Image (cartoon, grey):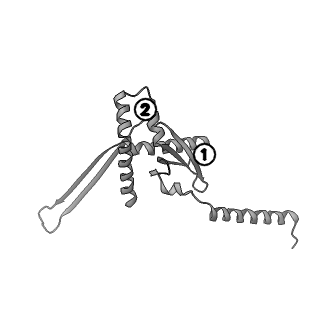
């Protein structure tokens, strides 16, 4: 059997590509922030809120990055204010007719949850991006520095002066409350 130069070149190229792919998978993988998710953190000199957003299956790359970034911003918004309505209905019945040794059982359980978050964010910046090639999932990490947010709110002309003063006076307390809620979530 005779091996041509082109065949050998294809084998070598394929082998190199396979080794590189295995190396990348072994060394790489998703960054830690993808697995950790959205949270509030006390960093060296500041308090920061991070939001992680993701989107899967969009082939238009610019659209996918934008959608993931918007999802990350929504994650931060949900940390501040979320309205949730919950409804659960249970129905159970047992029917007998004539012969009390035989019965028909019936049961139905329904659950509905509605969640809504609304807010205006200032100073939220994307700080990292990651694309999972296997699942075609785009991840974006956004960061909101609490001090910058307070300053932006204080300078905002749209806010009522009472609201600005409230944010200035209660911002630290709100952040501490948010941290406690995050700690409860992480403990589970």
Question: Which disc is residue 47 wearing?
Answer: none
Work out which residue is located at the far bottom of the displayed protein and give it. 1
Image quarter of the C terminus: bottom left
Front in this rendered view, residue 173 or 188: 173
Front in this rendered view, residue 45 or 57: 45
**In the rendered view, would you say 57 is above or below 117?**
below
Circle 2 crowding by C-alpha within 10 Å: few under 14, some 14–19, many from 20: some
Q: Residue at x 60, y 45 (%)?
A: 59
Q: How far apart are marks 1 and 2 (CA)?
A: 41 Å
Q: Position of residue 70 (x, y in %)?
A: 50, 41
Q: Give residue 157's quadrant in the image.
A: top left
Q: Residue at x 34, y 35 (%)?
A: 166
Determine whether, in the image, residue 88 is placed left or right of residue 94.
right
Image quarter of the N terminus: bottom right
Q: Where is residue 107 in the image (x, y as percent from the top left)?
A: 24, 58
Question: Which disc is residue 59 wearing?
Answer: 1
Q: Position of residue 143 (x, y in %)?
A: 51, 45
Q: Mark 2 points at which residue?
A: 154
Secondary structure of the residue carrying tag 2 is helix
Work out which residue is located at the far front of the displayed protein and give it. 45
Q: Give residue 154's quadrant in the image.
A: top left
Circle 1 crowding by C-alpha within 10 Å: few under 14, some 14–19, many from 20: few
Cβ atoms at labels 1 and 2 below 8 Å apart: no
Q: Residue at x 42, y 42 (%)?
A: 77
**In the rendered view, would you say 12 is above or below 138?**
below
Secondary structure of the residue carrying tag 1 is loop
**In the rendered view, would you say 131 is above or below 1?**
above
Determine whether, in the image, residue 141 is placed left or right of residue 18.
left
In this orientation, does residue 69 appear?
Answer: yes
Q: Position of residue 169 (x, y in %)?
A: 35, 38
Front in this rendered view, residue 125 or 131: 125
Q: How many marks?
A: 2
């Amino acid at each position: 059997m005779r091996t041509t130069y082109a065949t050998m070149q294809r084998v070598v190229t394929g082998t190199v590509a396979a080794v590189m792919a295995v190396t990348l998978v072994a060394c790489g993988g998703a960054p830690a922030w993808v697995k950790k998710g959205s949270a509030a953190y006390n960093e060296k000199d500041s308090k920061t809120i991070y939001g992680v957003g993701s989107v899967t299956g969009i082939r238009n790359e610019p659209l996918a990055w934008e959608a993931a970034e918007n999802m990350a911003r929504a994650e931060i918004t949900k940390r501040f204010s979320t309205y949730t309505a919950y409804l659960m209905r249970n129905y159970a019945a047992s029917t007998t007719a004539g012969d009390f040794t035989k019965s028909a059982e019936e049961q139905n359980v329904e659950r509905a949850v509605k969640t809504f978050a609304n807010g205006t964010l200032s100073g939220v910046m994307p700080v990292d991006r990651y694309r999972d090639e296997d699942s075609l999932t785009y991840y974006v990490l956004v960061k909101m520095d609490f001090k910058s947010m307070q300053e932006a709110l204080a300078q905002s002309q749209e806010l009522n002066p009472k609201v600005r003063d409230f944010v200035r006076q209660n911002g630290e307390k709100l952040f501490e409350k948010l941290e406690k809620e995050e700690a409860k979530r992480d403990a589970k």
